[in-house]
Image (tube, rainbow, N blue to C red):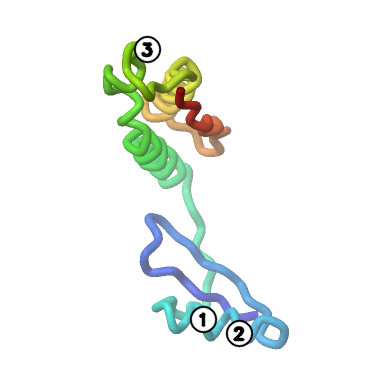
Amino acid sequence: MKYLQNPGAKLYQVVGYDEVTQEDEIKTALAEGWTEVSWIPTINNADLLSLCKAQAKELLQATDWSEIPSVSNINNTPHLVNVADFLFYRQALRVLVINPVANPIWPILPIENWI
């Protein structure tokens, strides 16, 4: 088994590869800047909470556009029909920002419905 670490990961991303059957994956990862490590890092609870909060913030930022008043204004064409779905989604993310958990259940991003 060969372990490679992604240097661009927010926390720890170490993947184990079988050197016989996953030779191509190893070459690709190394070409992308991954480095070989001889250990598997352990993640403590504080790191998991921090990662949860950071991920929730990112997901919120990705849907900030849904909060613009003109997006939901029914007098505009097009406008977002399922605004309530986005409000519910974003509220669930805010809960994770305020009260992060080690093993979050992530809300599902609604599909935009424009009319």
Q: What's the residue at 52%, 67% (across, down)?
A: 14
Residue at left offset 44%, top offset 39%:
52
Residue 74 numbered tag: 3
Quadrant in the rendering for residue 62: top left
Disc 2 is placed on an element classified as helix
| Residue located at (72% from left, 83% from top) | 21
Residue designated by label 2: 24
Q: Do the residues labelled 1 and 2 touch (CB within 8 Å)?
A: yes
Q: Disc 1 marks which amino acid?
A: Thr
Relative depth, front residue between 46 and 53: 53
Q: Nearer the viewer, mark 3 or mark 1?
A: 3
Per the image, the residue denoted by label 1 is: 28
Horizontal and vertical percent position of residue 16: 61, 72
Locate residue 39, reporting x and y percent. 52, 73
**The disc labelled 2 sits on which kind of residue?**
Asp
For the residues carrying marks 3 and 2, which lies nearer the camera in this image? Answer: 3
Q: Determine the CA span between mark 3 and mark 1.
A: 49 Å
Question: CB under 8 Å between callouts 3 and 2?
Answer: no
The residue lying at 56 percent from left, 68 percent from top is 15
Which is nearer the N-term, disc 3 or disc 2? 2
Label 2: how many residues lie within 10 Å, few (<14), some (14-19) or many (20+)?
few
**How many C-alpha atoms fall within 10 Å of the one at disc 1: few (<14), some, or many (≥20)?**
few
Question: Label 3 neighbourhood size at 10 Å, few (<14), some (14-19), many (20+)?
Answer: few
Q: Is 73 on the left or on the right of 36, as rendered?
A: left
Of residues 32 and 34, the one nearer the viewer is 32
User: Distance between the Cα atoms at labels 3 and 2?
Assistant: 52 Å
Q: Tell me the quarter of the picture where residue 11 sits.
A: bottom left
Q: Tell me the amino acid under the disc marked 3.
A: Ile
Q: How far apart are marks 1 and 2 (CA)?
A: 6 Å
Q: Is residue 45 above or below residue 87?
A: below
Residue 22: x %, y % from top left = 66, 81
Determine whether the residue tagged by mark 1 lies in a helix, strand or loop. Answer: helix
